[in-house]
Image (cartoon, rainbow, N blue to C red):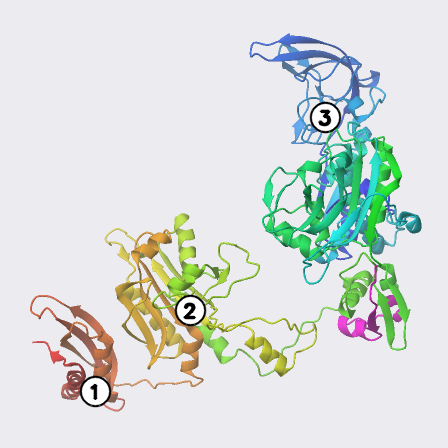
Amino acid sequence: MRVPLSWLREYVDVPADATPDDVLAALVSVGFEEEDVHGFDLQGPIVVGRVVEFVEEAQSNGKTIRWCQVDVGEANGGVRGIVCGARNFFPGDKVVVTLPGAVLPGPFPIAARKTYGHVSDGMIASAKELGLGDEHSGILRLVELGLDPEVGTDAIALLGLDDVAVEINVTPDRGYALSIRGVAREYAHATGADFRDPGERAWVELQQPVEGFAVAVDDQAPIRGRVGASEFVVRIVRDVDPTKPTPPWMIARLTLAGIRSLGILIDITNYVMLELGNPIHGYDLDKLQGGITVRRAQEGEKLTTLDGKERTLSGEDLLITDESGPIGLAGVMGGGPTEMTDATRNVLIEAAIFDTVSIARTARRHKLPSEASRRFERGVDPLIPFVAARRVADLMVEYAGGTLDTEVGGALFADVHIAGIDLPREFVPGLIGVDYSDAEIVGALETIGCEVTETGAGWVVIPPSWRPDLTDKWTLAEEVARINGYDRIPSVLPVPPSGRGLTPAQAGRRRVANALAAAGYTETPSFPFTTAEQNDLHGSASGEHLSSVKLANPLDGQAPFLRRSLVPGLLQVAHRNLARGFGDLALFETGTVFLPEPGVAYGTDQVPPLAVRPDAATLAALDASIPPQPRHVAVLLTGHRVAKQPGQAAEAFDLGDALDAVRTIAVAAGVEISVAQGERAALHPGRTGVLTVGDIEVGYVGEVLPAVSEAADLPGRVIVAELDLDLVLSLAGDRVVVASLSGYPAATQDVSLVVPRETPASAVRAALVDGAGELLESLRLVDDYRGPGLPDDAKSLTFALRFRAPDRTLTAAEATEAKLAGVAVAAERLGAAIRD
């Protein structure tokens, strides 16, 4: 919210010598965040001049310029010669002249310079050059603004260009501060300055119903049971002149507030919206057909909005309609057919209160955020529409030459009832940690506009109409702390209870992440959003359609589902890095996946109250309302393990590197993970492994299919692995196994076994381990040979075995005996034979 200081001073006593930083400091003290300071960035001398005469001169480039004689007053050098390219002024016109030494926004310094054969001693300025708008077709003629000042007058002060605006960040719960009225009130809270409420008008007089124009609300499908419009005030101003100029001070204030001038009628509605916080819409009364009805749209109904776009409407959209059909998206944007133009003579003014949820959904659905929707979706004071409508009417009478029709109008409104809130006497000090007195609590609440009635145990507090965010005793306590100063709240570090630390699962997850990072992998957390197709492809072995959690309000409409696998996110991260020139990638992520069970309905409408710990039954019900969310860990490799360098060829990542990552995870988790041949829909057949701990499947590893890599815009080979980390850690248990180190040397032997080609190497390894017994310390596959010397349906697997005894040095015969015992088991189970 940008707040021009001259406007702020109309409603609160800001000291004349207060700087923008002083005002920002005051607003920060009551909970606002400062953003910036905005001004017109002008430096004089910029004065009023009168065009005495000019001569038009054609140039060789085809352009015609005017060599002007402009009187800027004796004090400023009298008549000056100025070159000007504009053609929209006449002798005798009073204009704005920037003299040498002046600086325009940009910065653009003005100096006497030779151009088109003349020395131009200054410049005649346009509205855009002064920062007053986007109009650059011609210079600014002061007569068009209704001004006839003395020649030589300071134009900066004349046009309000010496004003400055402070910008603050307004959080969604404080929509009342999206107005000069709200910010002035907050400045008064911060400084104790006198506040003059522009919303205080003759309520009884203003709320007298004026009949003659039909207004109706026909909401057949209210959202959450709340009717779309609770108030709708109509006032009519006749015989306006839309060509009248907007006063310079209004243009300056609107410009500083970030809104460009669009003509007197629209400028007035925008001005009152900024002043009072109630969005206003004006209709060309002569274009309306019959009365106005507020209703929901019919599915597929069409409306052309003021931005010229035809929009297809949803059944949830709230519309303003007349007998011709839709004429506006309520609270968001008006329709083109009834907009005010330069031909408008009679204006119908609308000031309404619309349902916050309806407006927010419509603005988001149509991607149409507006100043109006921004205020309505945060809540508008329900007591302000009558004042706002009358304020617009008065300004149109004063500046557009209209006449208020006191006989014809319309209004729909309901009694505004604000429930009282019980505030126990000791609640605020106990919650905030400050020993506030009763007088401080009551004083703070009354300062912000609450009605406070004392009871035996505390107070009953009725919040003001402009504060819909005050709903319970906790929000009231926050206001007491805010008004009395956050600096009074002591800074105390919480003390953790002794004897507690990370849970075993947390410690295990941290060990796994640290181990992968130490192994050279980069952790890349990603958003858990994906598509149904990606869930089907990567979330199951066969690629069949699976149940997925679909978000009701997704950040990205193209990815509305929660992920069943971490791999889609890693593929996106890899693509993003490759697009930026990083081709050698070793990535990992740990995070939750979402695995709903088919046929189970998740979700609940039973939301427990705030600041109260739910009981066991409530927690159990909440847990049952969400799908299983196990934590997974996944890695992705693509590019080169070793980059090309002198004397060293590049070495690409392969499946072995992914298996090394799996072993790293296994060691960190405290389990032994086996790998066997497997299949996955997204992975290459023959290059895919199933990972198990004992007989329990915990994940997979493999090379991504070329078609899948290509679809993800990833050239070359991509290898991935994904494990159910929660399951892996649960299988490790809480035991800590410490193995003693033997001081005796190891005995190493190799064995090559011939087995059928379809026999998994993991099965041969398991047989050797089972047969070799306790003396076997480690076993590693070192070769897989298929070729000459072997039958076509056979392969040779070579294993490196290491034996060690804890109490003696093994002999070669003992190591050989243990090896042959393993070979015997492999022969019995798998038909293995030692290769000759």
What residue sits right under mark 2 in the picture? Answer: 633
Q: What residue span does the magenta drawing correspond to?
A: 416-442
Categorize mark 3 by other alpha carbons within 10 Å: few (<14), some (14-19), many (20+): some
In this rendering, the answer to whether 159 lies above or below 779 is above
**Which numbered mark, 3 or 1, is in the foreground of this view?**
1
The kind of secondary structure element at disc 1 is helix
Q: Position of residue 501 (x, y in %)?
A: 55, 79
In this rendering, the answer to whether 449 lies above or below 322 is below
Image-quadrant location for residue 304: top right
Seen as rendered, the residue at the extreme bottom is 807
What residue sits right under mark 1 in the picture? Answer: 771
The mark tally for this picture is 3
Instruction: Say left or right for 633 vs 412.
Output: left
Tell me how far mark 2 sits from mark 1, CA to CA: 33 Å
Q: Position of residue 625 (x, y in %)?
A: 56, 74
Q: Amino acid at mark 1?
A: Gly
Tell me how far mark 3 sits from mark 1, CA to CA: 96 Å
The kind of secondary structure element at disc 3 is loop
Numbered circle sitting on residue 102: 3
The kind of secondary structure element at disc 2 is strand
380 in the magenta segment = no
Q: Earlier in the sequence, mark 3 or mark 2?
A: 3
Instruction: Say left or right for 491 vs 196.
Output: left
Categorize mark 2 by other alpha carbons within 10 Å: few (<14), some (14-19), many (20+): many
Q: Earlier in the sequence, mark 2 or mark 1?
A: 2
Q: Amino acid at mark 2?
A: Val
Q: Amino acid at mark 3?
A: Ala
In this rendering, the answer to whether 572 lies above or below 238 is below
